[in-house]
Image: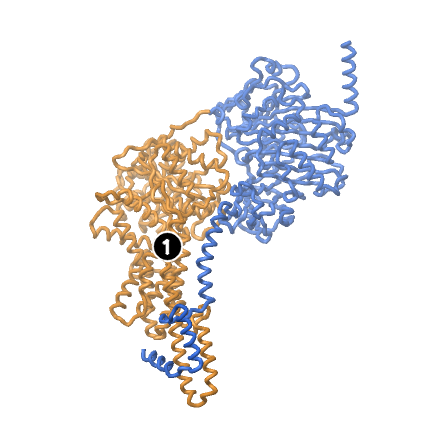
Chain colours: A orange, B blue
Amino acid sequence: MRRRRSGIVLQHTNVIRVVILGKKGVGKSALTVRFMTKRFIGEYDSSNDETWKHIALIDEEHVPLEINDTTGECSEEKLDLCATLRSDLYIIMYSITDRSSFLESRRLGNFLRENNSGNFEMALVGNKTDLEHARKILESEGTSLSEELECKFYEISVAKNFFDVEYMMNDAEPSYIDRLNSQTSTKISELFRYNTYWAKDIIFLVVDQNEIGIQSWLDEYHGIQSKYVKSSRMLGRSGAIQAAINLELDDEHISSMEILVESLNGQLPNLDMVNMVVRLCQSEGVPVALKKLPVRHFNDGWDEYRSSLSTMVSMMFNQASGRPSANHGLFPKYGIEAVTLRGRKNAGTGSVSFSRLGRALEGMFRSLNSLLESFHQSFFFYLLSSTSRYVSIGLYMPPLGCVMIGPILAAISCWISSVEDKERTQKDKQNKNSDKCENDEKDETRSEKTEKKEETNLEEFAFTRIPRYFGKVLRVILAGHFMGLLIFISPYMLRYIEMPPFDLQPSDLVLFVLFGAFLLSSSMPFLLRLTRSLTERDVLLLKSISLVIYTCQVGCLATINFSFGFFLAIFTVPTFLFVHSTQNRIRRLFQVVLVSISSPPFIIFLMTVVYSYFTTETDNYHEVMQNSKTLYSDGILSSLRDSVLIGTWSYPVTMLVILPNWLLFWSIAWM
Amino acid sequence: MSATWWGCCCFVCFLSSFVVGKEDFHEELYIKPFPSGDVLTYFQFTTLWSVDIRDKNAFSHYNLFPKSFGQIITKYSVEELHLSLTQGFWNTHLWGYAMQPASPGAELAVWFQDEVSQSIDKEWRSLTNVLSGQFCASLNFIKAENTASPNVSFRRRGVTSSKYNDSRTLRYSSLPREIVCTENLTPWKKLLPCDSKSGLSSLLNSLLIYKVKYHSMSINLRTICEDSECQVPLLELQQTLSIVTDPVLRSGGYDWSLRKLFGHSLRSSCPLATTSKVLVDITGNDTDFSFSLKPKPTRIILKAEEEPSRQFAVYNLKGKGKIPKLLSSDSGFNLVFKWKRRHNHVKVPYFFAHRFLTGYGEEHAGIQCEMYNHHKTASIKIVYFQVFPWHFRIFLHTLRIRINDVIIKPEYIDYVPSRDRERPTKLELALAVPPDSIVTVNLEFDRVFLKWTEHPPDAHHGFYLPSGVITAKLISSENTTFPTSHESLFSPSIKGTKTADNVIRMYTEVLLVPLPTPDFSMPYNVICLTCTVVAIAFGSLYNLSTKRLQEVDPREPTGILGKLKQKLLKLKEKLFPPRKSEDKQKDSKKND
């Protein structure tokens, strides 16, 4: 049996060459210019072949492009030349108003398919959709031609819309990194093919659009209909998937591997899986590390400790965000253990040879292959401080429990004092009554009075009894939750607006609406003040109930996503304990400031600032703020998007659970 | 002396053949190279015995028919039996329709004779246990809870004198979990007259034939007719072994030879066999264009009656000629196949099926079976049969059959619901798949929470859902491994002009379903944790909600003297209630 272990060779191709072909006057140059400059030109000189060099931002990375804009006349010799030139992407254009250009594009496409043996992508583009009234070529004809040529198909209008052009170019471009990864998987599959020990199917998955691609694939694999992403019918299914390894290589020279574990909603893969990956990498001599915040070096002996701490805190940050840290993060929802291995290129360190990486990967797959049962020991709850150390649930839960004892005790004391207050007033009333009665019928009422007194004594401090004024407080709590619901649905309401007002980008509009709704709901205390319905005793009861709800929330969140619950607790517990109704103006001002600091938008802001302070290596205050500002808006928008597309819970939980409760404390602070 | 000895022998032989009836043994090897590069080697050993299976007295003397097997079938009054042990999944996409289709794992289908129609379940239980011992397979796990009697899907392949035309004498079960290995092959080989000492069965090197993509061995017993009038019944025992090898795994290339596939060349034919033949499917090699075969075949047969005409190279290992000479030579008979120009184009069958699990998590589960008919004009009639073990609780109301997303009703449905720990759910559907369309069958089920003693030792492995059986009537024999026929041997069916009936059987994928499994290592932790939680949380809450808190005067004296003093004071209060002081207290509170 022959084994090909060191057969992984990757082509080095950095520049992507694009050739645009098509009949005269279909808009080739216009497309080029539009893509590079965002401008549209109507008239231009079209006599020469032009080659443009351009750096395009594709999938958030800068890719050098070389665009060859050909002239309209495509003779056989020239096509031959085109075919011999190495090109990664051929864009064949036709105009939907001109049938001869469509026929020409068919000829060009077939010629390229037959005469070009190299590895290339092709895209068919129908231009001039703005001239709909003069349409000669139906969209279906274009689709069928693209099927015939086995290429992608787009209908755009260069004149009218820049976004179409940009999308088309981004989509059609075979990204260098995609190709690198797909080549790696091809090599690995070739390596695997020569071995007989595979007892399980191995699926190689190459996705587009990151998480959305993975999500739609997983949905289709499990026969689930998604509302937003339509998948085509899948044939190559295997059985239940046991584990997934997401490999991300953005360079062929890798100096170390980074392992990412945080998945959707803070779920983590089984620790056995993580350990297996780490040990195999180490045994094959591939340096492997967890992602960590860069350590700011100080000259003392605490570096190792600080490094572990920053690793753990950065893991907790990622976990708390609820967003998957990489593409592996969508698998755990379907009961598939998954980790991401990301290749890192560090300056100044030697690179790991590909064969070593290949051996480590083979080892991982063989380990998974020989597993008879699925991962099931209960190591799903842990925090990693380094690849070899972890903090288990038994260690990290008790501190949080201690933190939460405060709110519980406070809730009990508030309850007692609110009931006590009531007791006193009742007694007062009774005494008044009894004083009146005394004058009239002294002897008869005496016995009754003592009886009543005993009754009230019996009821004193009983926790099972619901106070009579509970309804009033309940109304306030419901109002708070209603406000939360309003904020939650506010972005969805935007669907019904046809045209965005004030020329806002849709994303800005969403942020605008969210914050508007938030500010609106923070007016709740003033409404309460206007109605003047709550007495001091009611506020105490309100605080008690809010604290109970709060404790339950944090407890539940911490068992599902520990980091989320933890960060929530440390930011809010001191404030919520401190707040109570007061007559003192200075104290009131102070607690209003405190509560607003512990509001969800502000906590998120604070965390983004901290995060960008650590991740950007500058001490420039302005730059850090600038970064965190973009991070902040991106974070909110992406949490909204992901909650719809891939099912993250951060947005609904914040809006429907945390915010309403915060509103209650906000109201208490103003009392 | 020797002459009389030989005479005696001859007489005994003659007598026995007269009493017992004629017995014939045929060995055949059919090789088909697939366009994907894989090679199917299909061994077929047929024993024909002119005996009536109901005649128990006839089963007292055996020549070629295996005695141990003969005793079993007479003891339990078997009429027809099909047993298969399979490792791997037949890839219809690459290999077309299987010759001897079988579900992964073990599969057993038996028709019993009418005389035991009252006690079939008892016979079935005993038979499975005996067969389990005979073939070293865990057939003893076949119980009432995984046995079913399909009405339409399975039909007798032989002739019958039974008065029942329904499925009451049929028992069917499949064990998808069964792992097939050499220990099953050895008893199977021992049933052959030549064992594996000579003949084609000497190729069965158990080290190599399990390093393959697909491996399936089967035993089929049926009654056929010797002549067209069907006067004389003929008992046919067919032992088949299908192996799909990937030559690339063996040698790195797509070329193959008998030596590469089985480790050594063929050195003899079985002396007890009447015919001994090797056939190679050479369809599409008209001008020796795509591959070459060495040595030259005895003859080449063209079968043109079928829609796609087929060509076979036949090597006759018996009689006189070059091939028998080669057998006895030092190098032996080594069939060498070399590709000249391998076209990679695999023609996917126009009808195929695919089944998978839907849903995720512990609460949602279902299966979906998709049946594709890519034929442009012909609609295909199919019967879908599925047994669900009782731990998959099926809901019939969730059954959805769609043709291209339009819900339809099946032409025939037979549904027997399961009973926990007693019998499985049986579902049989008959419908027609229209041309150029996809039929999906959707069904949801509940994952039953098993008792903790019912979990197997490797509980987290999951539970197998047996493959669904699709019986389809195709319109041509395109893509079949071999034109289906009812003949016992290859040669007559190649020569015969009778066209195949094109009824094929297909097995869908076996599915591994994770059921909710308790974490068996957890009880200790759980007990500790719950006890702590109960003690701390529940205890204090219970205290708070049931006990009353009372204010205690901190100035209250302690000690025996103090308590005495207090009691005295209380007595005093009772005798002379201090009204004025109380009022004063209240007044002071009001002022607060």
Toward the top, the furthest residue is: B1
Q: Quadrant of residue B165?
A: top right
Vertical placement of A475 versus B178: above or below? below
Q: Position of residue B3 (x, y in %)?
A: 77, 10
Q: Is residue B406 visible?
A: yes
Q: Compare residues A270 and A343 and report the one nearer the observer.
A: A270
Vertical placement of B298 versus A286: above or below? above
**What secondary structure is found at the residue carrying circle 1?**
helix
Vertical placement of B104 versus A534: above or below? above
Q: Compare residues B339 and B416 and report the one nearer the observer.
A: B416
Is A592 placed left or right of B572 in the picture? left
Q: Quadrant of residue A288?
A: top left
Q: Mark 1 — residue?
A: A400
Chain letter of mark 1 equals A
Total numbered labels: 1
Q: Compare residues A130 and A538 and report the one nearer the observer.
A: A538
Is A323 placed left or right of B462 in the picture? left
Q: Position of residue A580 (x, y in %)?
A: 32, 67
Mark 1 packing: few (<14 Cα in 10 Å), some, or many (20+)?
A: some
Is B21 placed left or right of A308 in the picture? right
